[in-house]
Amino acid sequence: MPRFILTVLLMIAFQVSAQEIFKHELPAGKKPWTHEKFLEGGGRFSFVIIPDRTGSERPGVFPEAVRKANMLQPEFIITVGDLIQGPTELDAQSPAHLRAMWEELETITKKSEAPFFYLVGNHDISRTRPGFPRANEDSTMVWKEFAGANTYYSFIYKNVLFLCLNTMEGRDSRVPQIGITDEQADWAVKVLKANPQVRWTFVFLHQPDQWRSAGYQKIEKELVKRKYTSFSGDWHHYIKFQRHGRSHYVLATAGGVSSLRGKEHGEFDHITYVTMTPEGPVVANILLDGIMPDDVVTPATAARTYRSMLDTAPFKPAPGYPWKALIDDHTLEKHVSKANLVGNTITFSGKNAREIIPLTPPVLRGKRFRLTAAVRAQGKGSFSVKIREFDASGKLIKADGVTASGDFGRKSAVISPAAQAVKVDLCIESENFDSRSVGKARYIFVEELK
């Protein structure tokens, strides 16, 4: 067929299609609207992502998120994991307890009008650990009873690839525990290589810490050859990163434990609404009572620091900006020796220990600082994160900070250095630990208060 005739036929087909979409009775000429290029067709579709539900769940929020998602009429709903509480208590770790949790979950997800896709979180399939000798094995077994044999999977929708990973696969009784196994990484690479012509790829994984793992980086080497976007959860606060020039989102909560301090802290209950366009995804965050843009929190605007998972440094103070000390991965690797360091988490297990990280504020006199850290302690003894102050002779004047208790909790302390203080440092230490005691610290952040 001659190219001219084909072009004419395509133009006629487009006009017929446009008339089917939009009709009016007005004559030719100016119209009381701007244009007729409707946001329709071209493979457009929308889906909703619902973030973490558990970790001391606030009842009623997750069902409300599903209800609000129905109001938006997405083509499907997908999660970033943590759909059940899982075996977090010694008396609630049996398969029977886990089955009851899944049954309760299904009473909520069956109300979704669109298909609802599950993703493994660390509560859904848990980590085998002291006191929970079969946590991973049993929660994997129950997952398969309710969600099928595959704990990681992929699907293609309108020529868009969705890669759904399991960051808890290798956290069973093996030593050492890992998140994404070589087997899973090889599978993901095979899926990517088998689908080179998709117009976009979405990667879903619960724990963004796995971006640093050997398994994920093996997958990432294949991902960087294409257009893709990543979504994760676990941290219970929202932030958007750029990694390898692609957008990586850590979502906040939909009923999971949170202080709900607002957008400057990335702490809010929301759903994420993604529209796939011919140019790529458009992401919007919808609170249960409002709408926010997808860059509501970035490393440049966050009220706290984050792990160093960025293309560029997470924070560069502008001239005149209050001093801030970033206790990031590089700082920890340089100064932490006695503790077990994984990512941005310092762990002391069954021993008394002390780690010192130097701080160099420009002026101490008349200043006030806030120390914020996520801390946790189990067993006997105490575990603390403190700022220590010294005079000109090197004598310790005082030490103020936060002490851990129970599961991870974000704690803050305001410190006003003594007038004679000329030096400060950050001290993480355990005292009176026994062989089964564990202390952890992460998200450590020091800022000068105005």
Image (cartoon, rainbow, N blue to C red):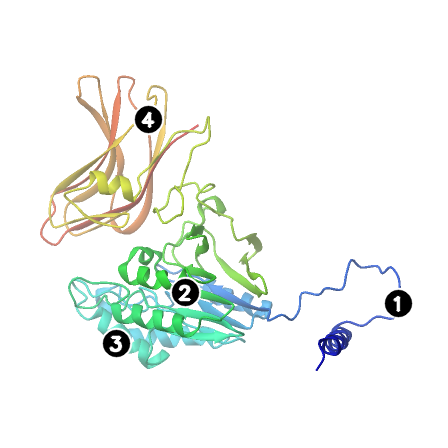
Mark 2: give few (<14), some (14-19) or many (20+) Cα within 10 Å.
Answer: many
- Identify the mark nearer the N-term, 4 or 3: 3
Instruction: State whether residue 309 is above or below residue 175.
Output: above
Distance CA(mark 3)–CA(mark 2): 26 Å
- Identify the mark nearer the N-term, 3 or 2: 3
Distance CA(mark 4)–CA(mark 3): 52 Å
* x and y, in percent, of residue 386 in the image: 25, 35
Q: Secondary structure at mark 1?
A: loop
Q: Secondary structure at mark 3?
A: helix
Mark 1: give few (<14), some (14-19) or many (20+) Cα within 10 Å.
Answer: few
Residue ID for mark 4: 361
What residue sits 48% from the left and 62% below the top? 227
Distance CA(mark 1)–CA(mark 4): 69 Å
Distance CA(mark 1)–CA(mark 3): 66 Å
* x and y, in percent, of residue 289 in the image: 57, 56
Would you say the residues marked 3 and 2 are in contact, meaning their CB atoms lie under 8 Å apart? Answer: no
Q: Secondary structure at mark 2?
A: strand
User: Closer to us: mark 4 or mark 2?
Assistant: 2
Which residue extends farthest left?
Answer: 435
Amino acid type of the residue tagged 2 in the rendering: Phe
Residue ID for mark 1: 26
Camera sees residue 193: yes
User: Closer to us: mark 4 or mark 3?
Assistant: 4
What residue sits 44% from the left and 61% below the top? 51
Quadrant for the C terminus in the image = top left
